[in-house]
Image (tube, rainbow, N blue to C red):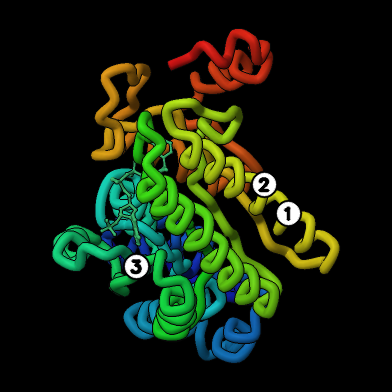
Amino acid sequence: MQPPLLGEGGYEVDRILLERTYALDAIPYTPTQVKNRPKIGDPFVKKFWNKEKFCTMQSPRKISLIEEWLRRREDDALKDNPMPKAIVIGASSGIGRALSKHLSQKGYTVGITARRMELLEGLQKELPNPSFIQPMDVTQIEESARLLEKLIQEMGGVDLIILNAGIGISSLDLLWENEKKTIETNVLGFAALANVAFEFFRKQRSGHLVCISSIAALRGSGPAPAYSASKAFESNYLEGLRMKAFNLKRDIFFTDIQPGFVDTDMVKNDKAFWIAPCDKAARQIYHAIERKKKHAYITKRWRLMAWLMKIVPSGIWKRVR
Ligand SMILES: NC(=O)c1ccc[n+]([C@@H]2O[C@H](COP(=O)([O-])OP(=O)(O)OC[C@H]3O[C@@H](n4cnc5c(N)ncnc54)[C@H](OP(=O)(O)O)[C@@H]3O)[C@@H](O)[C@H]2O)c1
């Protein structure tokens, strides 16, 4: 089918595109074409199309010009809005792994870190978009801070950092070794990396810092005193950083994620209930991040438990085992 001839004036760029779809026997505009549809007044349109010559041009030439224009627009769009970049600290298993996969599926370039290199390499093979691996032990405080800076540099910057690495050891016998390990990982390791992230975002004047705390942050816990205290530290530290960013007038977002039970290696507790699959938890965490929420319980039903935990009198709470 011959494309319709252009009328006088010939500046009706939408009509030209229509013509293109006719000529190529194509289906209507793709969403990108709709978004990038040439506007009258666009410098490129003025340069190439505000010429009578264009109106009399043969269709194939017009089409190749339009296609060149679309390519340039898409390249520009990519330059203006490149792939977002995220770093997940503690990505080798559980929530961090599921979240890394989710972010990559959503178009993020992801930097993944943890101690178990073989798991990170396995994960990298599953990621649909480019990724970076950085082995890291967060209890090596200075070293892990340096490695995070190095990873940010290798990735050419970062938009989102998720502090997920953590351990949860039940401490029925109050073994100091276990308490100490928990504090080194969830408090010292966490705070050192939160500082690096904050400093980077402060200089960049934007960014999003997420911490995977826990519902355990809400009250002290007899079975795991260091764990619940360390999670309270994480949540409060993040709030402190949010205040700091506000006072410095920086456009930095902070999201405190407090999961209940999620089905990972960490949950071997036979008293666990409402255990969420990792993928579901990752989806809900991503949703909270995308909406730049300050806080989210994962899964949502844990909001009810949080409310209960907050109101229960300490005389009753101390009986919980
Ligand atoms: N699962 C739950 O029910 C639940 C509930 C509330 C909060 N959380 C929180 O969610 C986060 C993730 O836990 P998860 O349940 O997904 O458990 P997980 O499967 O054991 O994952 C923990 C992650 O943290 C990393 N990690 C631990 N110690 C590290 C260290 N010293 N240096 C670097 N990375 C370290 C681990 O990697 P490597 O071992 O390879 O280093 C792993 O990738 C934790 O902060 C946890 O407190 C979990």
Q: Is mark 1 within 8 Å of ligand 1?
A: no
Gap in angstroms between the C-alphas marked 3 and 2: 23 Å
Query: Which residue does the image show at 37% across and 18% down from the upper left?
Result: 274
Q: Please tell me which residue is depicted at 60% across the width and 91% down the height of the picture.
A: 47
Quick one: SS at disc 3? loop
Spot occupied by residue 25 in the image (x, y as percentages of width and height): 27, 60
Query: Which residue is label 3 attached to?
Result: 137
Q: Earlier in the sequence, mark 3 or mark 1?
A: 3
Residue 69 in view, yes or no: no
| Disc on the earlier residue, 3 or 2 | 3
Residue drawn at 43 percent across, 83 percent down: 150
- From this view, report whether residue 76 is shown above or below residue 111: below
Residue 15 at x, y percent in the picture: 51, 64
Asked if labels 1 and 2 touch by Cβ distance under 8 angstroms, the answer is yes
Q: Amino acid at mark 2?
A: Asn
Confirm or deny contact between disc 3 and disc 2 (CB under 8 A): no
Residue 96 in percent (x, y) is at: 35, 51
Check mark 3 vs ligand 1: CB closer than 8 Å? yes or no. yes
Kindly identify the amino acid type of the residue bearing the numbered disc 1.
Gly
For the residues labelled 3 and 1, the Cα–Cα distance comes to 25 Å
- Asked if residue 277 lies left or right of residue 236, the reply is left
Residue closest to the eye, 114 or 229:
229
Which residue bears the numbered disc 2? 236
**Mark sitting on residue 240:** 1
Which residue is painted at 29% across and 72% down in the image? 135
